[in-house]
Image: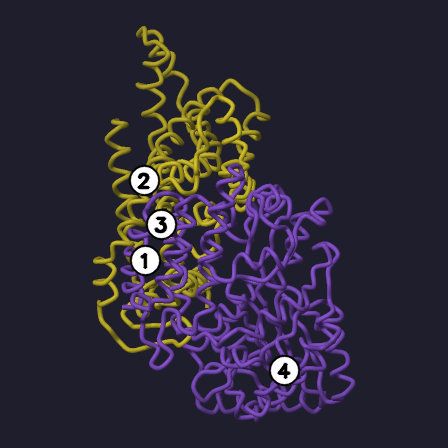
Chain colours: A yellow, B purple
Amino acid sequence: MSRYTPYLLVAPFFLVFGAFGVFPLLYTAWVSTHHWHLIAGDGGFTGLTNYRDLLADPLFYNALGNTLSIFLLATIPQLALALGIASLLRRRGAAWQVLVLVPNVVPVVAVALVFGQLLGRDYGMVNFLLGRVGVGPVAWQADTWAAHLGVATMVMWRWTGYTALLYLAAMRAVPRELYEAAELDGAGGWQRFRAVTLPGIRPTLLFTAIASAIGGVQLFTEPQLFDGSGLAGAGGSDRQFQTVAMYLYEVGFSRFNAGYAAAMTWLLFLLCATFAITATTIARRIVRR
Amino acid sequence: MRRVWALIAVLVVLVGGCSANADQRVRITVATFGEFGYEPLFAEYERLNPGVDLVGRVTDFDSHHKGLITALAAGRGAADVVAVEEQYLPALRRSRDKLVDLSRFGARDLRGQWSAWKWEQGVVGDAVLGLGTDMGGLAMCYRRDLIERAGLPTDRDALAALWPTWQAYAEVADRFSARVPDARFTDSAGTVYTAMLNQAGENYFRTADDAFIGDTNPAVATAFELAGAIGAKHQTAALTTFTQPWNVGINQGAFATMTCPAWMLAQIKQAGGPGGAGVWDVTTVPGRAGNWGGSYLVVPAQGAHTEAAYAAAKWLTAPAQQKRLFESDNILPSQPEVYRDPAVLAHTDPYFRDAPIGRIFAASSDAVRPNHRGVRDADVRPVFGRALGRVEDGKQTVEQAWRQAVDEARTVLR
């Protein structure tokens, strides 16, 4: 009996993972090869038709472009900013660290509502302030770039502090002797940062790059709630800020085309993997050993 | 193994049988959203039908409908009687086998209770899917202060006389914009467009065979051009109904008129606040007729007591109950016999300068013609709505927006 005990002990994880991880994945693959209406159910096997249609769907590419654009707008400044904040925090107490984490603890819906108010076209605070300095009102939702920037700001606001804390923890683990040696060699502050700190926190940099890549591909709540006009998932009158996850939602839950949505889910999954690998490669290249 | 299953089956039957024996009452759940005012009626129904327990389940609009769709897809979890708002009806008509055809229980005999258009919306072919509850007779709400500044008559009848048609309404918009540059004439192009569409017999799909005709139907094109032109001239505030900026717009006087169904008056009061009393008024909508919103009670086929559920739905939507709901909660009845009742017709509201809203809404719904919604209506409708949004945002001309919308609609329906 004792021979099976270890298996018994790890079994719960595999059961839960199987039920909520593997099964939905395989079931989604099954649905994606069918014509499947969400309410009416299975409408017959169609093979790879859903995938073929999806790859020829201009709206899918539009969503893909938006996702990529928002991801870049949100991630690059976020990681850079987090690095800066982390360096500043090294000489500060725990109170500051808690403060930096606050935006991450605020529920995303609350963040989206507040930003929606700030970035209102007619009565928004930001437009009011811009008006004070003579810049005309920006139609934050209607204009493509303004909308991307608005959504990216929300993402940045939520995650910069969290990333900064990860960096801070990693920085504290870099051996002090390395800095002393560098100082003896006559390295200035910036050089120490480039030659000692960055390589020292490389694993964490890679982790954050991958994590934000995956988060970026799945971006949904922020842009969904940024659209003040409804919850259909269209992302503006010209789909100007519709991300892939939103398009997935629109197809699956507004048009009830579950087969097509399932196919998109699988492409999204592959996309996540590709994104993560690319992000790792780039981050690796930037921070050489 | 088979024996084990047999045993389980026996146990299940036994347990089920026992609980049924212990409690002879049939339990019927009624799922609604927002405010239906049903609670006091449930108690009375139970008094009249000692064998039945009516249990209410109230959620908000979005989760209610999404929950219903999930339950229908999963085949379990739906209430016995479910309220469905008209915009979700086409989607349900598409999967009518998930709902009980109420004609099985004799629903066809009730037909005469409702206005023809209200009845027709709940019917697919031979099947009766839903019994009408309330309706949203359409009127035009307007701000007296802005209308006065534009030099237009503030009297309801005189103002309505200026816009017998939507064409005339658009001309009034021009007059208004020339005189009042700091406010818009209406809230959005979308509401004008929707009101016009609802006055036509056919919209995006042909009544005869449900084929897509959105690209060729002159009613759609005319409405799109007229509403689009108003949007392109910046005579709309480009606000989406029910959003927070829209509420602020009502409060701050960002626009002078908007189409308003009966149930929207409560929202105007809320957005306008006490300071808005006497500012807004109500008059007849161009084209005289219209309906926006209103619900149906449907019976999901997965329920255990569909016949008892039907009986409850039939009673809840009967004229006597509709009258009581109007008296208790101002819920506008969808049955001519009830809304022509002197108590309903005489209804006025001090917030809207004692406008005779009972008479206005009743007249509006009397004139409504049945309006065919295709089963895929909900897939196409938002496409054209967004197109008008692009025009209002100044991104596209009416022509460009129309062409893109037609293309997108065809793609969606592929």
Query: How far separated are the C-alphas under marks 3 and 2?
Result: 14 Å
Marks 3,1: beta carbons within 8 A: no
- Name the disc covering residue B313, or none: 4
Q: Residue at x 74, y 83 (%)?
A: B45
Direction from residue A142 to residue B273 in the image, left or right: right
For the N terminus of chain B, which image quadrant? bottom left
User: Earlier along the polypeptide chain: callout 4 or callout 1?
Assistant: 4
Say which of B413 and B390 sits in front. Answer: B390
Marks 3,2: beta carbons within 8 A: no
Direction from residue B250 to residue A268 in the image, left or right: left
Disc 4 residue crowd, few under 14, some 14–19, many 20+, Cα 10 Å: many
Identify which amino acid the numbered label 3 is placed on.
Answer: Arg
Query: How far separated are the C-alphas under marks 4 and 2?
Result: 51 Å
Marks 4,1: beta carbons within 8 A: no
Would you say residue A280 is visible in this rendering?
A: yes
Q: Quadrant of residue A56?
A: bottom left
Direction from residue A227 to residue A49 in the image, left or right: left
Residue assigned mark 3:
A239
Disc 2 residue crowd, few under 14, some 14–19, many 20+, Cα 10 Å: some
Residue assigned mark 2:
A69
